[in-house]
Image (cartoon, helix red, strand yellow):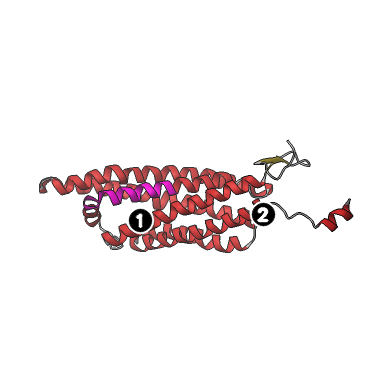
Amino acid sequence: MNQTDNSFLSVDAEFGLIQPGRNYFRLVGWFCVASAVAHVFALLLSLQVVRIGDLLAFSPVKLMRFISDHQLLWRSCCLLNAIASVSSVLIFLMFNMIVDRKVRILTRVGMILTIIACASELNAYASFMVLLSDLAVQLKLNSSYLKNDLLQLAWVIINQSLAQILLVGNTLWSVAGLLATIAILQTKSMPKWLVWIGMPVWLLSFTATCVAFIGDLSLCFSMMLAFSLGFVLWTVCLAIILDLHARPEPAPPPKQLAESN
C-alpha cells in the first residue's frame, strides 16, 4: 500500500511501519469534537444537579432526597457522564497513532489506564443510576423503622461508587492524560502550546483526587467541574490541530511547477 493523502493509513517506506493518513487525522478530530460535546452536556447537567440539590454541602440524606424527587434528572446525569467517559477512551485509543513512534509506549500505557478507569467509572455510574435511585425511592416510601437500614446501605453504595470514580478512575485518567501531554511534547508535528493547556488540566484532575482522599468532597466536586471545562477546551484545541493536519497541502504555483518540470 503506497502513501496517499486520502488513505486512513499508509506505509512508511523507510521503516515499513503503518502511519496515519489525512483522513485518519480528520477521524480522530471528529471523535475529539464528539467527546467535547458529550462532556459539555454532562457538565451542564451535573451543574444543574448540584444547583438544584445544593450538593456542594454534601450529605447522604440530602442526596437521597434529591434523587427521589428528581429521578429523571439524576439518571440522565449518570448516563451522560458514562457516555462522556466512554468517548474519552475512544480518543485515547486512537491517540496512539498520531504521535511520533518513539513515544508511543507512553500512549499505549495511557490507553490501558483509560480502559481500566472507564470500566471502574461505568460500574459506579450504573450503581448510582439503578441501585441508589431505587434505594432513594424506597427510603422516601418506607416506614421509619427501615429508613436507617436503607440509609446505611445507600451510604455504602455512595462510598464505593465515589471511590471508584474519584480515587480509582480519576487517578488513572490523570496519569493517562499526563502521559499524553508528554507524548505531545515529544511529537514534532504537534504544537507545544497544547502541552501548556493540557498539563494544568490533568494536574487539576490529579489534585482533585488528592482532595477527595483527604475527605473534602465539596472542594473536590468544584475542582472536578473545573477539570471538565478544561478538558473540553483541551479537546477542542486538539481537534482543531488535527483538522489542520488533515487538510491537503496547497498546490505549488504554476510557474514553480513548470520550473521543476
- Amino acid marked by disc 1: Leu
The answer to whether residue 38 shows anywhere in this view is yes
Q: Which of marks 1 and 2 is nearer the N terminus?
A: 1
| Residue 133 is a magenta residue | no
The residue where tag 1 is placed is 45
Range drawn in magenta: 67-84
**Percent position of residue 234, x then y:** 53, 59
**Percent position of residue 163, x then y:** 37, 50
The residue shown at (35%, 60%) is 47
The residue shown at (43%, 56%) is 40
The residue where tag 2 is placed is 187
Q: What element carries label 1?
A: helix
The residue shown at (11%, 49%) is 144
**222 left or right of 253?**
left
- Amino acid marked by disc 2: Thr
Disc 1 or disc 2, which is closer to the eye? 1
In this rendering, the count of numbered labels is 2
Q: Distance between the Cα atoms at labels 1 and 2?
A: 36 Å
| Residue 83 is a magenta residue | yes
